[in-house]
Image (cartoon, rainbow, N blue to C red):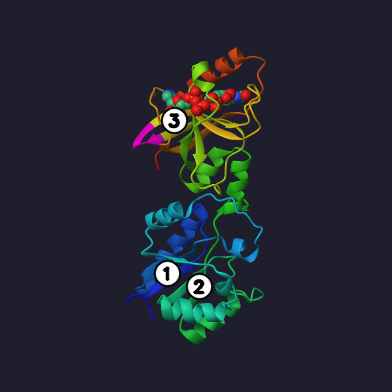
Amino acid sequence: MQINDSRYAATIGFFDGVHCGHRYLLEQLRVVASARGLKTMAVTFREHPRQTLHNDYQPQLLTTLEERIDLLKASHVDEVKILDFTEEFAKMTSREFMTDILHKTLGVDCLLIGYDHHFGSDTENGFDHYLAVGQEVGIEVELAKPFYCGTDNISSSFIRRLLAEGDVECAELLLHRHYCLCGTVVEGHKVGRSMGFPTANLRPNDSRKVIPQDGAYAVDVIWKEKTYRGVLNIGRRPTLANGNDRSIEVFILDFNADIYGEILQVEFLKRLRGEKRFDSLEELKKQIVEDAAVAREVKRFIY
Ligand SMILES: Cc1cc2nc3c(=O)[nH]c(=O)nc-3n(C[C@H](O)[C@H](O)[C@H](O)COP(=O)(O)O)c2cc1C
Ligand SMILES: Nc1ncnc2c1ncn2[C@@H]1O[C@H](COP(=O)(O)OP(=O)(O)O)[C@@H](O)[C@H]1O
């Protein structure tokens, strides 16, 4: 049974990050749809398909499901359809998927396929097969153009690698927004306050999100809809030698409140330096003062 009376031009993908390449695909979808008088639909999955296909695959993600949905909706897609990529679902052939799910259930009359996208259990088939099946079932199939940046085509895994190298500025360019982490403020080792730099220790709300490379970063901190500048450290605090756990801690500038248990969003603006072992606490404190002074001056781009 069809979900509603509308007919759609759709595109399929996991869309992790909803980066420039995805946005370019969605722009092409709008063009294809309006030429045919159709609405637009992004078909995506709750879990990463590779996680269902390979049980031991733990994806590191650029976006949580909620972030992904919000970003897709903000990209002017009329309908975002979330499918559960179950083991049963994974057994479906591309023909079954196109006929039963896309055409009959979701009302898809036109399918725009990403330049390298494959779907269905018949992984040996590609665009020509989808085109032939489309002609049989009444779906017009179109091939999308890729989005290039220099010679690299932009992908979620490329952006994950940039973050793993700490290059939050390049990731920002390709995401067209600042990379962000949302987390709850938890108790730390209570050393920060005594150093004159209380740091809110963040536990990410979704443990699958990519954590940028260890080091100090200039960030914006959003708490209760207000934005504060901050300096954030990711690492194992070698100077204090108080455990080998990897912490994410932020000293919020011009701020003084008890925020244990609160939810903060941090947006990464600039990597300042790598984490170091200092010979004394005094040297670490001096460095954090310098980090804070640099962070204060970092200009933020408004998207
Ligand atoms: C901007 C910033 C940079 C930091 N850089 C380092 C560093 O290079 N090396 C290090 O050992 N600790 C570094 N720290 C971590 C401090 O050691 C940390 O804030 C301290 O352990 C307090 O932790 P607590 O909140 O758990 O008490 C940094 C902290 C901040 C806020
Ligand atoms: N400017 C600030 N930046 C970050 N946290 C602050 C700030 N001012 C007060 N706080 C509070 O201080 C706590 C951090 O103090 P700290 O001594 O580093 O303890 P902990 O080790 O538990 O993080 C934060 O969780 C927050 O509640």
Q: Earlier in the sequence, mark 1 or mark 3?
A: 1
Q: Is residue 288 above or below residue 70?
A: above
Q: In front of the other: label 3 or label 2? A: 3
The image quarter in which residue 89 lies: bottom right
Question: As drawn, which residue projects farthest toward the left?
Answer: 5
> Is residue 123 among the parts visible in the rendering?
yes
The verdict on label 1 being within 8 Å of ligand 1 is: no
The image quarter in which residue 234 lies: top right
The image quarter in which residue 2 lies: bottom left
Q: Which residues are magenta?
A: 222-227
The residue that mark 2 highlights is 142
Q: On the rendered image, what quadrant is the N terminus found in?
A: bottom left
- Whether label 1 touches label 2, CB < 8 Å: yes
Disc 3 element: loop
Q: Main secondary structure of the magenta part?
A: strand
The residue that mark 3 highlights is 299
Q: Amino acid at mark 3?
A: Lys
Disc 2 element: strand
Q: What residue is shown at x 64% (from left), y 14% (from top)?
A: 280
Q: Earlier in the sequence, mark 1 or mark 2?
A: 1
Q: Is residue 25 above or below residue 265?
A: below
Q: How crowded is the residue under tag 1: few (<14 C-alpha within 10 Å), some, or many (20+)?
A: many
Q: What residue is shown at x 48% (from left), y 73% (from top)?
A: 111
Q: Amino acid at mark 2?
A: Glu
Q: Return the mark for residue 32.
A: 1
